[in-house]
Image: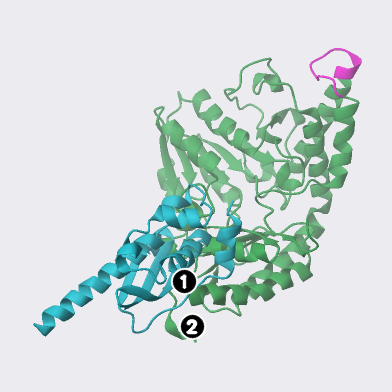
């Protein structure tokens, strides 16, 4: 590592683990390392910790009781378990699944997989900001619909969906509502009862807990089919010895997120608004992706015409700033992000996107430093691009 | 992910710009795919006397554009036509596999510029006759 200034603004991709979380985890790796299924003292220490942490996760989401929380290996597993587990269990009710066109790949690909198993999937359209079209939801919600799965807030563009309204519509029929709150949980208050959520995915690292841990809330009375079969842990719904240290860390992270959410949310919202303005106002042909205000406090997604995202990402990285791009080139596929395309952006506009996700350690100085860098980077790349109109380069 | 060499060319690309009175111009790629490259050439005594590029695209698209101008400068047209995508990637000490096809278009753009030059020459000769 050099002394060069390094600024991390890619928190949606991964977050540092809070030192208080690390401290809470250590005893469960070194001292209370028993298997929670064992009857002896070591096992029972681990069991006790596990049940206490379950209560903390339930508390963060206002779940009715701690038994509604199942621990998993992360958001991808929670989404897979929620979607496949529900539709397989209730397939006698119908074979139709509704989702949106701005979901995480773990939802998209779980749904696509199910189309090979006799299920019918509808990807509901969104508007230019990424809000799910509620009229389309009402229209597509037939008696054969078993599950509706919608993201609480999209991690790429930050748009917060009208979950309560969606819940009301979904429960007008005999369908279940699964919500992927991976990006939202820990940043904004989530109340499963108030919003009418039947199943909820949350992730530990997205709230500064360790990676490889997540949870799925399953409302009391709803049964799901397990994906992992084995020793019958997690009420038989998710076999495998519990990752006690990870889960303890997750719960500590949830506890911290809950107590600091209001202050941190307000701080980040101010920082975000200042950042969006600073990245778009001084530069021609610069736009914000998603809704200007109804978005997650940490999310700043912008796009610049005539240039490509990865070259901006690399330019920022050379200055010590780590971000994500919405372009094809930085990802494993060659297509731009399906989320940006769903907003109605043209391919070449989607390719010109940059995504900054702020975190606890980011300051206004960091944000101003990046705002200062951006005009030069955009200018240099536009001078290189054959797409740039002549007047912009003069 | 990228080699030192790719990053050097990305940071300080060689021969970036346009040649207003170019003898040949070649454009390949598509903004829809995220890469678009234009190569401009000046030809003197059957050799590439000057080459410039303009590129819209990712880091490797910019680095390959810069590298092709280095590889082709001063070469005869026949020699330049023999430069392959593989030569460009090798000169950059390798490209990530996913970039080998999508962004490694510089050789194609150069060949297109030379073909454009030949076409224009042919048109000129026909006009003379």
Q: Residues within 10 Å of mark 1 (few under 14, many from 20)?
A: many
Residue B111 lies in magenta, yes or no?
no
> Dividing the image into 4 quarters, which one contains the N terminus of chain A?
bottom right
x%, y% of residue B7?
59, 61
Q: What shade does chain A have?
A: green
Q: Residue at x 76, y 36 (%)?
A: A58
Q: Which residues are magenta?
A: A33-43
Q: Position of residue B69 (x, y in %)?
A: 44, 69
Pointer 1 with pointer 2, Cβ within 8 A: yes
- Circle 2 residue: A392
Q: Which residue is mark 1?
A: A306
Pick whichever, B64 or A54, lies toward us. Answer: B64
The stretch drawn in magenta includes residue A34:
yes
Does the image show residue A290? Answer: no
Using the image, name the chain to which the residue with label 1 belongs: A
Determine the residue located farthest toward the top in the rendered image.
A39
Nearest the eye: B20 or A152:
B20
Principal SS element in the magenta part?
loop
Q: Colour of chain B?
A: cyan
Q: In this orientation, which residue lies closer to the viewer: B7 or A100?
A: B7
Counting other residues with Cα less than 10 Å from the Cα at mark 2, is it few (<14), some (14-19), or many (20 or more)?
few
Classify residue A72 by image quadrant.
top right
């Amino acid at each position: 590592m050099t002394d060069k200034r390094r600024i991390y603004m890619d928190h949606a991709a991964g977050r540092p683990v809070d030192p208080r979380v690390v401290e809470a985890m250590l005893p469960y790796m070194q001292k209370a390392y028993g298997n929670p299924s064992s009857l002896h003292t070591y096992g029972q220490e681990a069991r006790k910790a596990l049940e206490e942490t379950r209560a903390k996760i339930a508390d963060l989401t206002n779940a009715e009781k701690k038994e509604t929380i199942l621990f998993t290996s992360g958001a991808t597993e929670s989404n897979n378990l929620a979607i496949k587990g529900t539709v397989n269990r209730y397939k006698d009710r119908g074979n139709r699944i509704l989702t949106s066109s701005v979901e995480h790949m773990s939802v998209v690909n779980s749904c696509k997989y199910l189309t090979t198993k006799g299920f019918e999937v509808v990807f509901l359209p969104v508007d230019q900001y990424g809000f799910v079209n509620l009229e389309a939801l009402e229209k597509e919600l037939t008696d054969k619909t078993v599950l509706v799965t919608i993201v609480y807030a999209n991690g790429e563009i930050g748009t917060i969906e009208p979950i309560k309204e969606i819940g009301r519509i979904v429960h007008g029929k005999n369908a279940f509502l699964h919500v992927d709150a991976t990006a939202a949980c820990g940043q904004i208050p989530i109340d499963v009862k108030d919003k009418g959520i039947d199943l909820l995915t949350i992730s530990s690292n997205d709230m500064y807990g360790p990676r490889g841990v997540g949870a799925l809330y399953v409302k009391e009375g709803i049964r799901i089919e397990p994906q992992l079969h084995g020793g019958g842990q997690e009420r038989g719904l998710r076999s495998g010895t519990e990752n006690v240290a990870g889960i303890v860390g997750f719960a500590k992270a949830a506890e911290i997120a809950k107590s600091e959410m209001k202050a941190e949310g307000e701080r980040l919202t101010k920082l975000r608004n200042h950042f969006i303005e600073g990245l778009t106002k001084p530069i021609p042909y610069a736009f914000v992706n998603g809704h200007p205000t109804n978005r997650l406090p940490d999310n700043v997604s912008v796009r610049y015409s005539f240039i490509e995202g990865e070259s901006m990402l690399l330019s920022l990285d050379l200055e010590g700033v780590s971000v994500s791009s919405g372009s094809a080139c930085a990802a494993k596929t060659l297509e731009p992000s399906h989320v940006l395309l769903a907003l109605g952006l043209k391919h070449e506009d989607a390719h010109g996107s940059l995504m900054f996700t702020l975190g606890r350690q980011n300051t206004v100085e960091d944000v101003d430093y990046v705002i200062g860098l951006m005009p030069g980077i955009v200018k240099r790349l536009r001078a290189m691009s054959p797409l740039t109109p002549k007047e912009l380069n003069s | 992910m990228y080699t030192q060499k790719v990053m050097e060319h990305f940071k300080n690309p060689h021969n970036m710009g346009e040649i207003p009175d170019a003898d040949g111009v070649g454009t390949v790629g598509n903004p829809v795919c995220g890469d678009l490259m234009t190569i401009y050439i000046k030809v003197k005594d059957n050799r590439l006397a000057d080459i410039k590029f303009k590129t819209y695209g990712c880091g490797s698209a910019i680095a390959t554009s810069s590298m092709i101008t280095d590889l082709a400068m001063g070469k005869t047209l026949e020699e330049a036509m023999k430069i392959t995508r593989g030569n460009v990637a090798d000169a950059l000490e390798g490209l990530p596999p996913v970039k080998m096809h999508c962004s490694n278009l510089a050789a194609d753009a150069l060949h297109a510029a030379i073909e454009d030059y030949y076409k224009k020459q042919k048109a000129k000769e026909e006009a003379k006759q």
